[in-house]
Image (cartoon, rainbow, N blue to C red):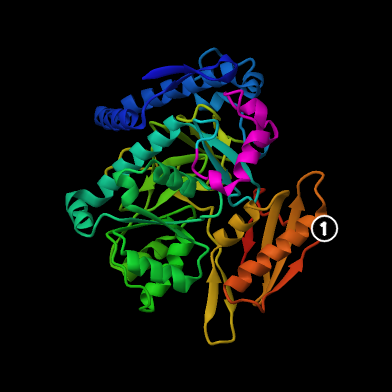
Amino acid sequence: MTEVRSPRGTTQRHETMTESAVRLRREIRRARKQGRAAVARRQGDRLADLVAHARAASPYYRELYRGLPDRVSDPTLLPVTDKQKLMERFDDWATDRAVTLAKVRAFTEDPGLIGRRFLGRYLVATTSGTSGRRGLFVLDDRCMTVGSAVSSRALASWLGPLGVVRAALRGGRFAQLVATEGHYVGFAGYSRLMHGGGGRARLLRAFSVHEPMDRLVAGLDAYRPAFVVGYASTIMLLAAEREAGRLHIDPVLIQPAGETMTPGDIRRVANAFGTRVRTMYSATECTYLSHSCAQGWYHVNDDWAVLEPVDADHRPTPAGEYSHTVLVSNLANRVQPFLRYDLGDSVMLRPDPCPCGTPSPAVRVQGRAGDVLTFPTGRGDDVSLAPLAFSTLFDRMPDVELFQIEQTAPATLRVRVVGSRGADAERVWQRAHEGLTRLLADNKLDDVVVERGEEPPVQAAGGKYRTVIPLAA
């Protein structure tokens, strides 16, 4: 381990990725073997350490935590944060004082920098999420390495020894279904790995979710991956292609992420491909939050994350009931701490031990469902577009603060866009209209009408905005 001085004198520790990943995997195994009490102690110690670091190095948290006890290992003592609050205090939020909103925005405007190290040491990830409000996040190496270690352990448990052998016999190749035109965490992490080279890079290939379906199918058939990882809505579209006999891949494992899948969705994908399906419930703010088990529950990686289902007043929701929202604390990222961060999802904590035998807390998720839009073509077939196609389009547009797309008729989209403060509303709308028209044309949907909604985006119960609203049944 080495110690270096960052700009403005802040001391930061850096470990090589290999050393850190190996140590973290051992630590995770050791903690799990020691039982729930050991994991709880580690969680409390890591929370207390991160709170102390945030108070010392972040002006925002120093102000927010004024008056709290010197040591805080109980998350319920902390005030709640959310994307809007943190983005409004971006420069004061970061613990590295060289990280500023102006620098991060300039970095994300250059697609050539995707996956490159911001300030020589961080990964930058953007997100609009299901709220439609853009986030700019900075992740340090420790956060990325914890995510890699936790995910590797989950993958090994999903496959088992026989699955590992089957994957190796099929080449061990991973297909990642990602948005390839922005600094999204999946593609940014993939790009960093590609820049670094090495053996792992040779087993990974990114496939753009923006590709028309026929080209995506052809690319996957040619690559023949052993693993398919990516957005749930795109995987559902691929399942339909497999059922129709147009897609021929035979993966060992399919791992949908980013959007909620129902048990019926999971069964459909598993049956279509004749393979095992395991899912993730996570977010850019905490990429390793949880992984699913064979029983369909998401088990929280609670040695490195805190998840709190709460009501509208941020009081704990009883186990067995769906929450109003959920608060998440990422215990690994120290450059932009996410502490009691309101993720906006409705989750239910399992009230009894999970039959799979995993002792960590298990949840089901009601929120974050992907809404696929389906359009008639007049050619005897329909074209479906995943919500990610729209959210990533708007995320790349400058001066868009909030957006919402509603399918009001089979071939009509009503678009509501809120520009950033001081932005030219007409120019923002023109960009939105041109971008949507181009996206539709690329998918042979030239007849779809794009209407401008003068009204603000419609807010759902609980305060969230659905970015994509399909035609009502």
Picture quadrant of residue 456: bottom right
From the viewer's perspective, is residue 122 above or below residue 410?
Answer: above
Q: Nearer the viewer, residue 208 or 280?
A: 208
Is residue 324 visible in the rendered structure shown here?
Answer: no
> Tag count in the figure?
1
Segment colored magenta: 87-116
Q: Position of residue 297 (x, y in %)?
A: 38, 50
State left or right for residue 317 relative to residue 193.
Answer: right
State left or right for residue 269 relative to residue 53.
Answer: left
Disc 1 secondary structure class: helix
From the viewer's perspective, is residue 436 above or below residue 198?
Answer: below
State left or right for residue 460 relative to residue 226.
Answer: right
**Structural crowding at the residue carrying mark 1, measured as other residues with C-alpha within 10 Å and reported as few (<14), some (14–19) or many (≥20):** few
Quadrant placement of the N terminus: top left
From the viewer's perspective, is residue 51 above or below residue 129?
Answer: above
Q: Position of residue 227 (x, y in %)?
A: 32, 57
Write the residue at 55% across / 66% down.
Answer: 372
Write the residue at 55% across / 54% down.
Answer: 181
Is residue 175 visible in the rendered structure shown here?
Answer: yes
The amino acid sitting under disc 1 is Glu
Q: Is residue 265 magenta?
A: no
Residue found farthest to the top:
70
From the viewer's perspective, is residue 191 above or below residue 373?
Answer: above
Quadrant placement of the C terminus: bottom right
Identify residue for label 1.
Answer: 426
Q: Is residue 103 magenta?
A: yes
Q: Position of residue 121 (x, y in %)?
A: 49, 30
Q: Position of residue 294 (x, y in %)?
A: 30, 53
Picture quadrant of residue 98: top right
